[in-house]
Image (cartoon, grey):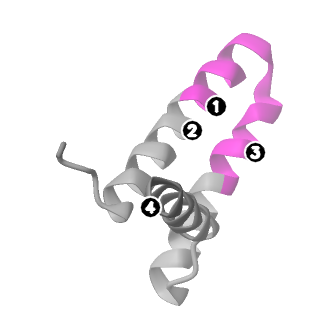
């Protein structure tokens, strides 16, 4: 069985990817894309204090669905 990334590492990867993409889009298409960068940053900040991360809930549900389909 292949090694799987932990949920925490998946969240970091998604956040990093979205930040890089939004910065590229802001450079190419306009400064309003910085709001997406801000949204990602604020969500990471609040989740560090509250423990609530919408992406975590989505990833857990996806993994649960995949494991149910295998059985």
Q: Are marks 2 and 1 in contact (CB under 8 Å)?
A: yes
* Rendering quarter of residue 61: bottom right
Spatial CA distance of label 1 from label 4 is 38 Å
Spatial CA distance of label 1 from label 3 is 9 Å
Which mark's residue is nearer the viewer, 2 or 4?
4
Say which residue label 3 marks: 35
Which mark's residue is nearer the viewer, 2 or 1?
2
Which mark's residue is nearer the viewer, 1 or 4?
4
Crowd rating for badge 1 (residues with CA inside 10 Å; few <14, some 14–19, many 20+) = many
Q: Which label's residue is closer to the chain start, 1 or 3?
A: 1
Say which residue label 2 marks: 18
Say which residue label 1 marks: 22
Query: Relative to 25, is 59 above or below?
Result: below
Q: Are marks 1 and 4 in contact (CB under 8 Å)?
A: no
- Residue 4: numbered disc: none
Spatial CA distance of label 3 from label 4 is 42 Å
Query: Relative to 64, is 40 above or below?
Result: above
State the residue at coordinates (18%, 47%). Answer: 3
Q: Which label's residue is closer to the chain start, 2 or 3?
A: 2
Mark 3: which secondary structure?
helix
Which mark's residue is nearer the viewer, 3 or 4?
4
- The stretch of residues the image draws in magenta is 21-39
């Amino acid at each position: 069985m292949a090694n799987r990334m932990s949920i925490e590492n998946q969240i970091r990867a998604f956040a990093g990817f979205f930040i890089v993409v939004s910065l590229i889009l802001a450079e190419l298409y306009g400064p309003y894309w910085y709001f997406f960068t801000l949204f990602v940053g604020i969500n990471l900040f609040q989740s560090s204090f509250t423990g609530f991360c919408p992406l975590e809930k989505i990833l857990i549900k996806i993994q649960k669905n995949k494991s149910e389909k295998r059985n």
